[in-house]
């Protein structure tokens, strides 16, 4: 497949709650990070081939204050302090994409809040196949 979605509400959650009171989420809800530094959501992602994969986090931030998060892959920094700027309202969702190196097999991808406001509301992680893994056309 071109991409695989991992729902935040099905991930490992530390200091956060699954909620569904703001429309527009996919799956059955989203994670409301506790408003503390260090709250996180961790996804377990399996890929068949190592490579640089676009990782897209779908989120909402109904405030005007950034809610940056450290993104790690297998415990190593992939995107420290990645910005999750305000989206205008809690039911307004946006995509934030980074690219990270994944190993063949199981990978853990963690998004950890770095400020006392906690993370944004997190809907899902989409893992897109690297373009260089597509079969040749000629
Ligand atoms: C509001 C909103 C929550 C959000 C929270 C926050 O309470 O309804 O969905 O998570 O603000 O500031 O984190």
Image: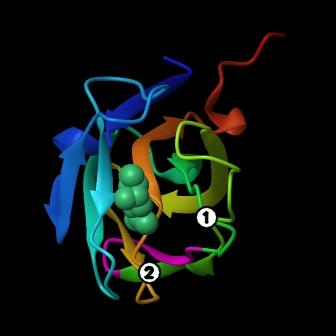
Q: Between 27 and 86, which is closer to the camera in this rendering? A: 86
| Residue corresponding to mark 2 | 117
Q: Position of residue 128 (x, y in %)?
A: 56, 35
Image quarter of residue 47: top left
Q: Which residues are magenta?
A: 67-75
102 vs 94, left or right, is left
Residues under labels 2 and 1: Cα distance? 10 Å
Q: Residue at x 57, y 46 (%)?
A: 56
Answer yes or no: do the residues labelled 2 and 1 have beta carbons within 8 Å? yes
Q: Position of residue 65 (x, y in %)?
A: 65, 75
Residue 50 lies in the magenta-colored region: no
**Would residue 44 be visible to someone looking at this image?**
yes
Q: Is residue 74 magenta?
A: yes
Front residue of 60 and 43? 60
Q: Is residue 66 left or right of residue 80?
A: right
* Rendered residue at 51%/26% (across/down): 3
Q: What residue sits 66% from the left and 72% below the top? A: 83
Q: Identify the image quadrant of residue 16.
A: bottom left
For mark 1, does the 10 Å Cα neighbourhood hold few (<14), some (14 to 19), or many (20 or more) residues?
Answer: some
The image shows residue 25, relative to residue 17, as above or below, that is above
Question: Which of these two is toward me, 71 or 27?
Answer: 27
Residue at the disc numbered 1: 63
Quarter of the rendered structure image containing ligand 1: bottom left
Mark 1: C-beta under 8 Å from nearest atom of ligand 1 = yes
**Residue 133: percent from left, percent from top:** 62, 33
Q: Secondary structure at mark 2?
A: loop
């Amino acid at each position: 497949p071109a991409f695989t979605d991992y729902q935040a509400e099905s991930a490992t959650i530390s200091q956060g709650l699954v909620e569904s009171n703001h429309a527009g989420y996919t799956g059955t809800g989203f994670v409301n990070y506790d408003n503390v530094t260090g709250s996180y959501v961790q996804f377990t992602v399996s890929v068949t081939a190592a490579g640089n994969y676009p990782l897209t986090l779908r989120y909402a931030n109904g405030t005007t204050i950034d809610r940056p998060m450290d993104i790690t892959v297998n415990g190593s920094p992939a995107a420290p302090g990645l910005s999750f700027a305000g989206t205008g309202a809690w039911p307004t969702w946006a995509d934030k994409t980074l690219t990270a190196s994944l190993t063949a097999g199981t990978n853990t991808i963690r998004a950890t809040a770095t400020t006392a406001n906690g993370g944004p509301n997190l809907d899902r992680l989409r893992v897109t196949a690297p373009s260089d893994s597509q079969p040749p056309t000629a």
